[in-house]
Image: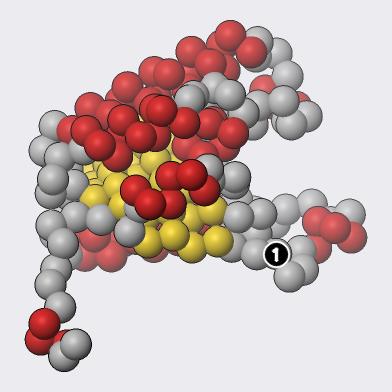
Amino acid sequence: MAFEDYQTKPSVVIVYTGEGKGKTSAAVGLMARALGNDYRVAFIQFIKHWEVSEHKFIHKIEPLYKDKLFFYKGGKGFYNAGDLSARDVTPEEHKLAAELTYETALNCASNGKYDLVICDEINNAVNDGLLKVSDITKLIDQRNINTSLCLTGRNFNNQLLEKVDIASEMHKLKHHFDNKFLANKGIDF
């Protein structure tokens, strides 16, 4: 098939998953690319409730992009992972936070206002049982035809691969955490 025979889809579903570093970073890069193309972007955060560097960056650029950039941080921390900042959060509170964040994501994906909706760490919420696999299916199926969707986080359910257009898996070759070094601010978070 010749290149001129290829077509452009009105929107795509993208997945960044895997145990390696870089899923959120890839999503932030995708956000930058979309904003640079004058797209309207919703960045929905499912897990990280603490102020990480990407949140600080988004807050700094929000005034520049005004109504073209919507940011929602709805997580309560990593579920059942020994996250000290989330140790006082009950499983019910984690689940409720994930469900409310999901409703925000579903609204953004289906209302036609955004060209790109990024659901950062949503795969973790599903894997941890805070959301259902059927929630991801509904999110994909009910999104506006012109709204691209990006789903990040570990443990993407491969049964959903047929519903996505692009899926990348980040593999860890080496990480200094394995040698008992903590994450570096501005690099890892």
Q: In the rendering, at what x and y percent does residue 183 appear?
A: 72, 53
**In screen coordinates, is 102 left or right of 48?**
left
Residue 180 visible at all: yes
Kind of residue indicated by mark 1: Lys
- Under circle 1, the secondary element is loop
Q: In the rendering, at what x and y percent does residue 110 appear?
A: 18, 33
**In screen coordinates, is 85 left or right of 31?**
right
In this figure, which residue is indicated by the disc labeled 1?
Answer: 172
Q: Report the front residue among 61 and 176.
A: 176
**In screen coordinates, is 169 left or right of 180?**
left
In the rendered image, the vertical position of residue 122 relative to residue 169, given as above or below? above
Q: Residue at x 39, y 41 (%)?
A: 119
Q: Report the front residue among 25 and 56.
A: 25
Q: Report the front residue among 183 and 81.
A: 81
Q: Residue at x 54, y 53 (%)?
A: 17
Q: In the rendering, at what x and y percent does residue 56 appear?
A: 45, 45
